[in-house]
Image (spheres, rainbow, N blue to C red):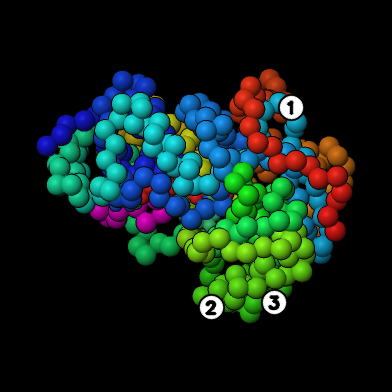
């Protein structure tokens, strides 16, 4: 039997962050993750400015990760074929990067261990013997048969959160809001050096991507919102109402043919698969799921915190882990800690995610997507601003929330401004 201040369930980005920040606040922490170190989370491996700034604060060193690739320009193909180049600020740190999740998550586990947390890999959350209440602490059974008593539990155990299920706080049979596929390729074309996003008419408001890694491979995949509505056939354009979606076998068919689409194949160049492809849901409905329950604070994918427009969730997961640790460290009874955490998360994300959901609805319409991306491409200034907004250099709804304005917000440095790492070079000619 072990008594701690905080039990963190899950050692992904959210859990590792919660553990490090709780330890820095002087709290006793056990972290349990059912997977072994170096688990391969199905992901695009893309890191936004938000994620990079959080990783830097955690003490993660990109130079030690050989798959790490800083991105200086992203290329976007609009549904009609227009290519838009989105340059990120140069010489002022990193605003976007790509890193294999096996390496990133392993490095995050190392940081949690180094912080002094008792990290137990291959150890699952097996259930509550008592979730606790305002007077009694929580008791949790782990799969290593240890009984943990904890003042607080941080649920950072992903989209299918076992902790959430054990608390009975649903939603029942929740399978995320996006469905996303990912595979690795060895590619020798333009894609090996540059980040690409394709807004394919049959995937809108979703998109396909190719993200370059520093180890000579690329992460290729696509994501589509999981919505109720009329299924549509592969290759069919998005419906005027934007209610179209792909179903099971059609998703598999898209994946099978994705890299053979001429404009994508042209960017990839000669390529061959490297490892198996995988699919996994992305939960993106922050506020739709409980963020706290009694002595349990819920973070990252377990709280459905991914961005509803892009499906990116690493930055939010790390940030929420930090916010949960900070809410616990400030002390007080469980209901005050929970209220503090929930209020902080709502203030940070609620409006941004509402805006992102609205924009996603616009992108569902091919013509509106074309117009919106045309506006992005209007001038060098709009391209630069969109790139920084897209990569979460500042909050999605920053313009509408003056309380978050601060001096230099639109001119802030990226992360790791003083470190030299691999940079995806900008090729001399534009691809067709
Ligand atoms: C195909 C795809 C592409 C994506 N691309 C990107 C991208 O490019 N950029 C981006 O920012 N986001 C991306 N995302 C989203 C991103 O992967 C997630 O938002 C992020 O991993 C959430 O981190 P987390 O720590 O909350 O959860 P997770 O990373 O899922 O970690 C949860 C941890 O909990 C552990 N766990 C689960 N159950 C238990 C249990 N019962 N007991 C103990 N431990 C348990 C798991 O082993 C795991 O280590 C993508 C997602 C998908 C599916």
SS assignment at label 2: helix
Q: Viewer-proximal residue, 272 or 45?
A: 272
Which tag is nearer the camera, tag 3 or tag 1?
A: 1
Q: Viewer-proximal residue, 395 or 185?
A: 185
- Dot 3 or dot 2, earlier in sequence: 3
State the extent of the magenta-drawn residues as a range: 158-168
**Are the residues tagged 2 and 1 within 8 Å (C-beta)?**
no
Residue 128 in percent (x, y) is at 19, 48
Residue 55 in percent (x, y) is at 51, 32
Residue 429 shown in magenta: no
**Are the residues tagged 3 and 2 within 8 Å (C-beta)?**
no
The residue identified by callout 2 is 249
Residue at image coords 77%, 69%:
262
Q: In the displayed image of the protein, which residue is found farthest to the left? A: 1
The residue identified by callout 3 is 236
The residue identified by callout 1 is 91
The answer to whether 245 appears left or right of 33 in the picture is right
- Dot 2 or dot 1, earlier in sequence: 1
SS assignment at label 3: loop
């Amino acid at each position: 039997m072990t008594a701690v201040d905080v039990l963190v369930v899950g050692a992904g980005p959210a859990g590792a962050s919660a553990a490090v920040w709780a330890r820095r606040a002087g709290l006793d922490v056990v972290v349990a993750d059912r997977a072994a170190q170096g688990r391969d989370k199905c992901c695009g491996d893309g890191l936004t400015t938000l994620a990079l700034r959080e990783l830097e604060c955690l003490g993660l060193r990109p130079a030690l990760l050989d798959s790490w690739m800083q991105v200086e320009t992203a290329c976007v193909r609009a549904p009609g074929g227009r290519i838009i180049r989105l340059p990120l600020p140069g010489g002022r740190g990193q605003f976007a990067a790509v890193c294999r999740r096996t390496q990133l998550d392993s490095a995050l586990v190392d940081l949690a261990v180094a912080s002094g947390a008792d990290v137990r890999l291959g150890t699952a959350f097996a259930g509550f013997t008592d979730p606790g209440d305002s007077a009694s602490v929580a008791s949790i059974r782990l799969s290593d048969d240890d009984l943990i008593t904890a003042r607080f539990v941080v649920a950072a155990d992903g989209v299918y959160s076992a902790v959430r299920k054990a608390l009975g706080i649903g939603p029942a049979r929740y399978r995320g809001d996006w469905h996303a596929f990912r595979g690795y390729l060895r590619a020798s074309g333009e894609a090996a050096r540059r980040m690409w996003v394709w807004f394919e008419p049959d995937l809108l408001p979703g998109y396909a991507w190719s993200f370059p890694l520093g180890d000579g491979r690329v992460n290729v995949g696509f994501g589509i919102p999981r919505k109720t509505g009329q299924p549509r056939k592969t290759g069919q354009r998005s419906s005027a109402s934007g209610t179209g979606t792909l179903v099971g076998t059609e998703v598999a068919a898209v994946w099978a043919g994705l890299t053979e689409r001429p404009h994508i194949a042209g960017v990839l160049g000669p390529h061959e698969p490297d490892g198996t492809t995988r699919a996994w849901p992305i939960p993106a409905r922050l506020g739709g799921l409980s963020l706290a329950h009694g002595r349990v604070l819920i973070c990252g994918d377990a709280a459905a915190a991914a961005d509803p427009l892009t499906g990116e969730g690493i930055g939010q997961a790390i940030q929420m882990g930090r916010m949960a640790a900070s809410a616990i460290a400030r002390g007080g009874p469980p209901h005050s800690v929970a209220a503090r955490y929930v209020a902080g998360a709502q203030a940070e994300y609620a409006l941004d995610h509402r805006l992102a959901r609205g924009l996603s609805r616009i992108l569902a319409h091919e013509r509106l997507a074309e117009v919106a991306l045309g506006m992005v491409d209007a001038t060098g200034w709009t391209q630069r601003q969109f790139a920084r907004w897209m990569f979460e250099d500042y909050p999605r709804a920053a313009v509408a929330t003056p309380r978050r304005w601060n001096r230099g917000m639109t001119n802030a440095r990226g992360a790791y401004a003083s470190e030299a790492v691999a940079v995806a070079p900008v090729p001399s000619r534009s691809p067709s």
